[in-house]
Image: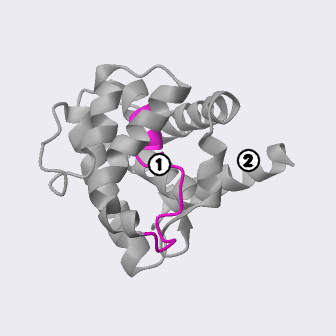
Amino acid sequence: MRYKRKYFEQQISKEVELLEKESRFSMTRDFIQHGEVSVFVHCVCVAYLSCCIMRFFNIKANLGALILGALLHDYFLYDWHDGELCRKVHGFTHPFKACNNAKEDINLSPLEENIIKRHMFPLVPIPPRYRESWIVCLADKICACEETFIGHCKGKKMEFAEKMFEKGKITSD
């Protein structure tokens, strides 16, 4: 099935709203990921780009698992810039911390677990098992490079992520 961009946005929005009600996902707004980009905005950008990659290459994938895995791939819930010694290996360890945190809050399928645990390949040397995991792994690398070298994600994914961030600020006040 060939999805439209608006459909992706609706599905991501629904999942974010659900996660903010049923988990600690809103905490991702308080932590910086790359540059000045919050973990929340980064994860929404990765989810958005993952959907675009799936659509562009006409890849048959589980859209729900793709979105949930992308939103939770960096669900580690700490400031990795705080200078603590254990943060020096953040790149190697955070996928497992993110997965454990997600499993504490919601039920994950094996596919969703794999997306979260393997998104740092090749830094974490075990490759992704599923096409959804590969898509999120690629989207994460693209978004991380944009955030690191440009200071933010580019284009519609950033516009959408900022809109979601502001929407959450309004509802949480």
| Residue 55, horizontal then vertical, whole percent | 32, 39
Asked whether 76 falls inside the magenta stretch, the response is yes
Residue at 66% in and 34% down: 17
Magenta part, dominant SS:
loop
Residue identified by numbered label 1: 76
| Residue 103, horizontal then vertical, whole percent | 45, 27
Residue at 43% in and 49% down: 74
Question: 119 or 5, which lies in front?
Answer: 119
Question: 76 or 57, which lies in front?
Answer: 76
Left or right for 137, reference 143? left
Q: Amino acid at mark 1?
A: Phe
| Image quadrant where one finds the N terminus | top left
Residue range highlighted in magenta: 68-84
Question: 77 or 169, which lies in front?
Answer: 77
| Residue 125, horizontal then vertical, whole percent | 12, 49
Residue at 77% in and 52% down: 169
Q: Residue furthest right?
A: 173
Mark 1 near mark 2, Cβ–Cβ under 8 Å? no
Dot 2 alpha-carbon crowd within 10 angstroms: few under 14, some 14 to 19, many 20 or more: some
Q: Secondary structure at mark 2?
A: helix
Residue 58 in view in this figure: no
Left or right for 131, reference 37? left
Report the label total: 2
Residue identified by numbered label 2: 168
8 w.r.t. 146: above or below: above
Left or right for 139, reference 29? left
Q: Amino acid at mark 2?
A: Gly
Dot 1 alpha-carbon crowd within 10 angstroms: few under 14, some 14 to 19, many 20 or more: many
